[in-house]
Amino acid sequence: MIRSDGRRPDELRPVSIEPGFLKYAEGSALITVGNTRVLCAASVDDKVPQWMKGRGLGWVTAEYSMLPRATQERTQRESAKGRVGGRTHEIQRIIGRALRAVTDTAKLGERTVWIDCDVLQADGGTRTASVTGAYVALALALRNADNFSASKWPLTGMIAATSVGIVGGTPMLDLAYDEDSQAHTDMNVFMTDAGKYVEIQGTAEAAPFDRQELDTMLALAERGIRSLFDSQRRVLAAAGVPLAAGAHV
């Protein structure tokens, strides 16, 4: 099957990560994956939620939103509706879980890192782009907020994410919206650089998929995520941010 943008089935869309995009945030990054663009900002607050006080641990949490014209038709702001939708709530939780999976909260100390992911333009993969860009913003914020020694660096690894799916009978990596909308199976994979999974979200939209197809999609996802780790490393190295303790090159 020929993809609309001419990519091979196992090829990511063009990826760029621009660090320090915001002047005032402790850490920020604008990530572009094809036509999907997400602005990620990390803010450090020297306190933790009430239920965590006195435990000597920090917290990493996230908020996610999509601008009204990030899509082809305008969508109403959730603030105007007076509530956060189920999809938004789900994505916020996975961003927070993914980042906490590679953060030693004891070394973070009693502080909270807020991650704000705002989708400027959506063409599929906004949640996976958010996690990938948010990791860079988090690392930059930790570098800027405190002078951690190597032994006290709070990040224990790296995290990135991508989508995979079966479209027209062909397993494909990094689905754009037109591919995702017609996929028989679609899956979002969130993985650390140690090759461990934080979450796998997979759904058969038509016929159920078998174990062989699952293994094929996971292998495709790992290939794409390894490439995303390379992009993150280049950006962080150029910004003088140390690799996470124990990070896998």
Image (tube, rainbow, N blue to C red):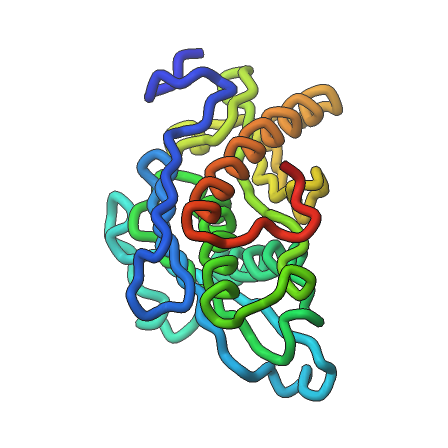
185 relative to 197, above or below: above
54 relative to 6, above or below: below
Query: What residue do we see at 49% from left, 56% from top?
Result: 87
Q: Is residue 132 something one can see in this rendering?
A: yes
Q: Quadrant of the C terminus?
A: top right
Residue 193: image location, x then y, percent = 65, 41
Camera-nearest residue between 217 and 113: 113
Query: What residue do we see at 59% from left, 67% from top?
Result: 148
The answer to whether residue 246 is left or right of residue 1 is right
194 relative to 108, above or below: above
The answer to whether residue 14 is left or right of residue 59 is left
180 relative to 47, above or below: above
Query: What residue do we see at 70% from left, 41% from top?
Result: 194
Residue furthest out toward the front: 149
Residue 31: image location, x then y, percent = 38, 46
Camera-nearest residue between 125 and 135: 135
Residue 110: image location, x then y, percent = 63, 80
Where residue 21 sits, quadrant-wise, is bottom left
Query: What residue do we see at 42% from left, 46% from top?
Result: 238
Where residue 129 sits, quadrant-wise, is top left
Q: Quadrant of the N terminus?
A: top left
Residue 144: image location, x then y, percent = 45, 67
